[in-house]
Structures are given as C-alpha cells and as structure tokens.
Amino acid sequence: SSHLQSYGQRAQNFTNPAAKLLLETMERKKSNLAVSVDVTKTKDFLSIIDTVGPFVCLIKTHIDILEDFDPSLITQLKELSQKHNFLIFEDRKFADIGNTVALQYSRGVHRIADWAHITNAHAVPGPGIITGLSSVGLPLGRGLLLLAEMSTKGSLATGAYTDATLRMAENNRDFVVGFVAQQRMGGHHEDFLVLTPGVGLDSKGDGMGQQYRTPREVILDSACDVIIVGRGIYGGDTAESVRAQAQRYQDAGWSSYLERISL
Ligand code: 5BU
C-alpha cells in the first residue's frame, strides 16, 4: 500500500486556493500535463489551447511573445480555461525589486494578476520579491512558484542558491506554493508543488541549451508533480498531430504518477 498521498489528497496540505484547485484539477482530469504555448500569433495560440485543453491541468503562457496581443485575447483565454477546466500559469520569471514586480504583475498591458492563477519568480533579489508579488496576488487567491533550478545546460541555479530558494519558499507558505525545478528536493517536510520543464520524448535538446528528459524520468525518478511540454506537443503542424501528442504526453505523465504512488 502506498505511503505517498495522491494529488487529490495533497490539496488539503495547502491553504492557497490556486494550489488546491490545481491538485483537484489534476485528480479530476487524470492529468499532470502542462502545455507551454510559445507561439507569436493569437490565432495559433487560441487554437492550440482549444486542441490540448481536454488533456491538460495547466496552460503555461509567455504572454509577452504574442505580437498581436489585444486584451480581448484574455477574455478568450479565460473562456477556454472554463470550457476545458485548466488553470493558467504565466511563466513571467519576475526578477526585480518588490515595488517593481508588484507593478509588472498588476499593470502594464498584460495585467497578469487578473488572469494567471500561477506565476513564477527568480529568488535572486531575495524575499522582497515575494513581498511585492504577494501584495498583489495573495488577495486575489493567486500562487507563486520560485525558480529553484533550470532545465538548461550550465544553469547557475544549483547548490547553495537552490537551497536558499527552498528556505525562501518555506518562509512564505501562504503565497509560495512550490517550485519550477528538475527534481523534488529533500530536506523539507512541508508539501510543495514541483513543476518541471525540459520534457520531451523524441528529442534530447534544442541546440540553444535546452535539455529534455522523459515524463517517466521526471515524474517517477525525480518525483516531480507536473511535466511542462512545449515544442514536443505543438511542434506538429496539424491539429490532429497536436491532439495526438497531447494525449501521448498525458498518458506518459499519468502512468508514471500511478507507478510512483503505488511504490
Ligand atoms: P519546450 O518547447 O518544451 O522546450 O519549452 C519549454 C518551456 O518551458 C519554455 O516556455 C521555457 O521558457 C520554459 N522553461 C524551460 O524550458 N526551462 C526552465 O528551466 C524554465 C522554463 Br524555469
């Protein structure tokens, strides 16, 4: 019998509503797949999301790469999130002083805090970045992930830096719900979500530093919670290939999770 809690059971370990909703959504949809939709045209962005929606718990965005961004896009993104029951993660990687990140999070043309359930930040400025972001996000029920590690070759986020990032999260449990990292990190007894990019079944890298591991390596061997997949899914040119890849990664992620909780 398993000593590990299911995703659904872990929802009770969090007070943060975004973390609870993500875990409940994962359990309900049997999906630990997040799709990263890194395209530059609104039309492609929305059509990929509508295609992969049934297979994902989370859609990850880089809203600033859309060259025809218009606020009405956000209305449509929210509608798709309702239609398919997924959360939205803006991969903004905030990295400035608290006052500045609070403005970047709430204002500008993108108004990220209005629509993104989850966003993320580098730990490099120290805890003030959490104070700034939580002043905006906490009253809205949003959640924050800290970048504890990166998927890229030669990443500097290792060792003492990664450890200090963990401590920052532990001291801000109400708003910080977990990490973007390559593995579940030991040394803490509290529950955190671990979301992991750099996932691919057919490729080992991209020639620009990205490194890929399989869903099984990420979920089973490294005990992460969510696989984040971009080009491996939307790289094909037909809606049918995008759909088939989303299904394939959902199955690979979920079967690895079932194997892990049955250990
Ligand atoms: P890919 O197409 O699956 O390589 O896309 C990966 C996405 O995850 C892309 O949006 C990156 O910005 C993002 N990412 C990453 O690849 N590695 C990291 O360590 C972090 C984010 Br943090």
Image (cartoon, grey):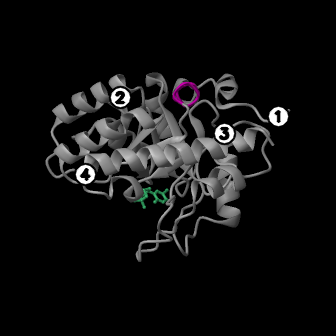
- Tell me which residue sits at (54%, 43%) in the image: 251
- Identified by mark 3, the residue type is Phe
Q: Amino acid at mark 2?
A: Ser
Q: CA distance from mark 3 to mark 2?
A: 24 Å
- Pointer 3 with pointer 2, Cβ within 8 A: no
Closest to the observer, 157 or 37: 37
Q: Which residue is mark 4?
A: 238
For mark 2, give the secondary structure: helix
Sequence-wise, the earlier of marks 3 and 2 is: 2
Residue named by callout 1:
2
* Residue to which mark 3 is pinned: 192
Question: Could you tell which of marks 4 and 1 lies nearer the N-terminus?
Answer: 1
Marks 3 and 1: which is nearer the front?
A: 1
**Residue plotted at (47% across, 71% down):** 205
Residue lying at 37% horizontally and 58% vertically, measured from the top left: 231
**From this viewpoint, is residue 91 visible?**
no
Give the residues in magenta: 24-29
Residue 26 is one of the magenta-drawn residues: yes
What is the distance, in whole Å, between disc 3 and disc 1 at their CAs? 19 Å
**In this view of the protein, which residue sits in the foreground, 166 or 87?**
87
Q: Residue at x 64, y 25 (%)?
A: 8
Give the secondary structure at mark 4: loop
Can you give x and y, in whole percent of width and height, for residue 226 in the image? Answer: 56, 44
Q: Amino acid at mark 4?
A: Thr
Dot 1 falls on a residue whose secondary structure is loop
Give the spatial CA distance, label 4 vs label 1: 41 Å
Residue 89 sits inside the magenta stretch: no
Indicate which disc, 4 or 3, sits on the residue closer to the N terminus.
3
Tell whether label 3 touches label 4 (CB within 8 Å).
Answer: no
Numbered mark located on residue 81 in the image:
2
